[in-house]
Amino acid sequence: MSGIIGIFAFDKVWKASRFIYYGLLALQHRGQETTGMAIGGETGINMYNGAGLVDQVYNENILEELNGWYGIGYVGALPRENQPSLVREGDNEVALVLSGRIFNEAELAREEQVKHWSNQSELLARLILKKSRGDDLKSAASEVMRMINGVYTFIAINNKEEMIVARDSTGLKPLVAGSFGFDYGVFASESCAMDVIGADYKADVNPGELYYLNQYTVERKQVLKPNPKYCAFEYVYLARPDSRINGVWVYEARRRIGEILAEKYSIDADVVTGIPETAIPFALSFSNKRGIPVELGFVATGRKTRTAIKPSQFERLVGVQLKLNPIKPVFRGKRVIIIDDSVVRGTTTKNTVTLLRNKIGAKEIHVLIGSPRLVSRCPYGIDVPSEDELIARHLNDDEVAKVVGADSFHWISLDDLVKAIGVPRNKLCLKCFGG
Amino acid sequence: MKVLIVGGGSREHAITYAFAKSSYEPRIYAISPLRNPGIEKLCKESGGELIRGDILNPEKVSETAEKLGVDLVFIGPEEPLFHGVSDALEERGIPVIGLNSKASEIERSKAFMRRLMWKYKIPGRLRFKAFRSIEEAIAYINEYAESVAIKPARQVGGKGVKVISDVQAYLRKVKEEVKKKHTELIYEKFMRSHDDVVDKILIEEKVEGPEYTVQCFTDGKTVKPLPIVQDNKHAFEMEMGPETGGMGSISGRGGLLPFITEDEFKESVRIIEEVVKALRKETGTSFRGIISGQMMLTTLWGPTIIEFYSRLGDPEAVNVLPILKTDIVDISEAILSEKLHKIRIYFEDYATVVKAIAPRGYPNRKDLARGHVIRVNEEKIKRMGAEIFYGSVDIVNGKLITGGSRAVEIFAKGDSIEEAAEIAEKAVSYVESLDGWGLFHRSDIGSGVSLRRMIEMANLVRSVYSYRKSKGLFGKQIDWIPGRGKIGYEF
């Protein structure tokens, strides 16, 4: 999991670092372990990486020193994954951020005789640097796109005032294009980053498309034949609800999920509540549809964290416990529907249900999940655990209900999820849901 | 009959085209710094010629006109107007379409224009401050400026304008820096060399909305609008990239645009009429030529003046002149005899699209964009149903060489904007770069996606200005300031 952003000003009077900083803040939900940015300007490319949240890693001085009018930024969910990668050869520099996964790493390295690379973004940066020979970044990037077997979005800059932006033929990872007046072009994993820095969303980067920017041109090139396989999990959990990706508002997909759950499961209850934060829109639309009051059920302690993308089981547990302090009067003596976005191992759900029933005294607890059964690992870099850890792969709904201690337990069906997203099924990647 | 066209770009090519269609079959001469092949060809066919010359020199131009014994001069660009070419011709008694230097002040001095609109309380005005020195402007930026447009106070070929939306407090500092640096740049790059206006920097409130141009013929008493046109200023696709003189323009059937209502069009013309009236009162001068409002539909007023042109727009002229049905000689004569109210001006009922093709490097690095060889297949373009209008090109040793700005413009017409855009888009491929440097154009101009975006934006703006109008808030602002209470002021 990661989020990337690139900004290219057409007037060198601009300083890109602060725009990238706030853009990364808006993408923070896509990765909370490491962050970095590389800025191109008069003195070549300057880079800064760090572990932690965006507002912990950078400060005024760092942003001030990252001088230049074009740059790239990264937030990632893997510890020690430092991006951007900045590579040099002679006078030539390339910095690159990658969100995605490359499958033919070794082959690519062999073909271009790259000996050392610490991560896939560095490998791509080296390939592009070698192929471009300090010249023609655009052709180099097209060639590299054709060589890669993988799902990815990447943004790269060099020290020749150029930027390239690429999205693989599946478009599995989201990427949008926008601009700020006459002054700069912006590319980001999600449109919410545009809103936060005051830029206007213009379009999604097409699957298989390459953008090339310098002071004189913005060129778009369809390098690979589009074969859309948009990640369905973006709509359920990953993306921010104020983003619009692949032409669909994330919030609207989530609202429809809640409505479909309300139509399908005619459970009688006194109150419905969503597990913060992702599942709240599900609960709101469920309530609107069914007329069962929606309540705020839980309050978080400390910073906002995205528990599902935390690297270790221990951190996830801590994260969940801190974020789920129930508001007791909402549940005491009530028949309760709780809606969550997904269930992986079932441990969190079990803890929550046990707490609500045993400590607080909820009368009935029904659990609805806004995603279909999670049954497979994600081959594309979303950190779903290995398959023997996935409860949905091993137990049916009644069994899950018993394990977590709920009166009933249901997932949305795969067909209904597709309907909620509103993108044709053959254009969605549903692998983790067994589709 | 003999006419002389002053200027050598696409707009002047379109003016020449209109005269070439005239039933009076005038012999057409043109004076231009470059050898525009389109103008040259039309001149030759009519028995006239293209003369290379300095169009900013009033003496030279009027001398040429006198020598040729022309019956009429039509001036295309604004700089000859500012330099008094029209005045010099009038002095020699040569009939001229083109505002004199006093009247063209409406375009030359943006501060003059704004003051005039305020003095006469003409709707569609914006709040502004004019500064005579950098220091004053920077002091103002330090204290007040939020979302603003910073402009050179004089028209300098449409350049030097920076529009900065400054809403997010957390980005204020970096934007303040840019505002100051840009103010310095305007002064150094554009205003230092122009001592013909006292104001140097203009800071206006920033407004947002769809832009459009209302070009009008005027004799000083009557204002007759041409079909409304929208120009697209961003250099690159999807409204990305730096501001240009215009990368292409559209006009719809019935003289309207799909995102501007008839009422808004009428209101726009009324604003221009009021400005002409005010200008005549202020200057007492004659007024024979063109006046165009570069306008925007804003939440403040609906139709709002961004700038005035004392001439036709480029590329906007290329949208309208090819579909002009009324004889341009008749229109010119009506203007000269101040009888514009007596004639009706007809256009073919088509939607039109113009696409500009520019060498890479335009607009910010014209030095790089200059001097490249291009080839135009006029035959094929015609066969597509399109027309080519030459802009910033020269003929050197029989080759077509780019001059650094927009090289050519493709005109197409159709039953809808989208249809015309498709024709123009196909025709674009018949303009090629021969030295590998590369040309660019905007494929999105006139597309359905682009039109829908404009309609959406216009609807939003329209609902806000209608609300403001219904609350009696046009030209007013009401604030509440803690400790001071309610403060209302009019502008």
Image: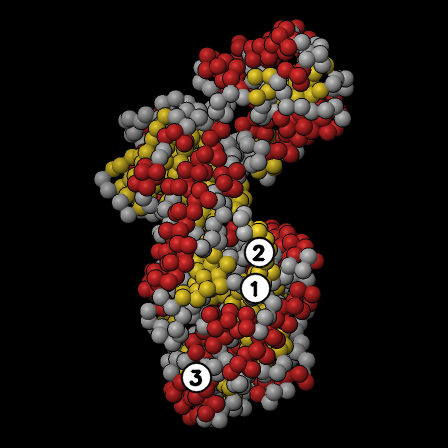
Q: Distance between the residues labelled 2 and 3?
A: 49 Å
Say few, some or many: other residues with alpha carbon within 10 Å of mark 2 (under 14 / 14 to 19 / 20 or more): few
x 64%, y 52%: residue:
B460
User: Horizontal and vertical percent for residue B390?
Assistant: 47, 70
Residue that carries the numbered disc 3 in the rendered image: B85
Chain at tag 2: B
Q: Which of A400 and B389 is in front in this view?
A: A400
Residue B419 appears at what percent x and percent y? 63, 59
Residue nearer the viewer, B482 or B299: B482
Q: Look at the picture and state if B106 lies above or below A158.
A: below
Residue at mark 1: chain? B
Q: Position of residue A309 (x, y in %)?
A: 49, 21
Q: Is residue B366 left or right of residue A403?
A: left
Q: What element carries label 1?
A: loop
Q: In this view, does A400 lie above or below B155?
A: above
Asked if residue A248 is positioned above or below residue B244 in the image, the reply reads above
Image quadrant holding the C terminus of chain A, namely: top right
Chain bearing tag 3 is B
**Tag on residue B491?**
1
Mark 3: amino acid:
Val
Q: Residue furthest left?
A: A90
Badge 1 density bin: few <14, some 14–19, many ≥20, Cα 10 Å: few
At 31% from the left edge and 46% from the top edge, which residue is drawn? A41
Q: Are marks 2 and 3 in contact (CB under 8 Å)?
A: no
Distance from label 3 to label 1 (Cα)? Answer: 36 Å
Q: Mark 2 points at which residue?
A: B487
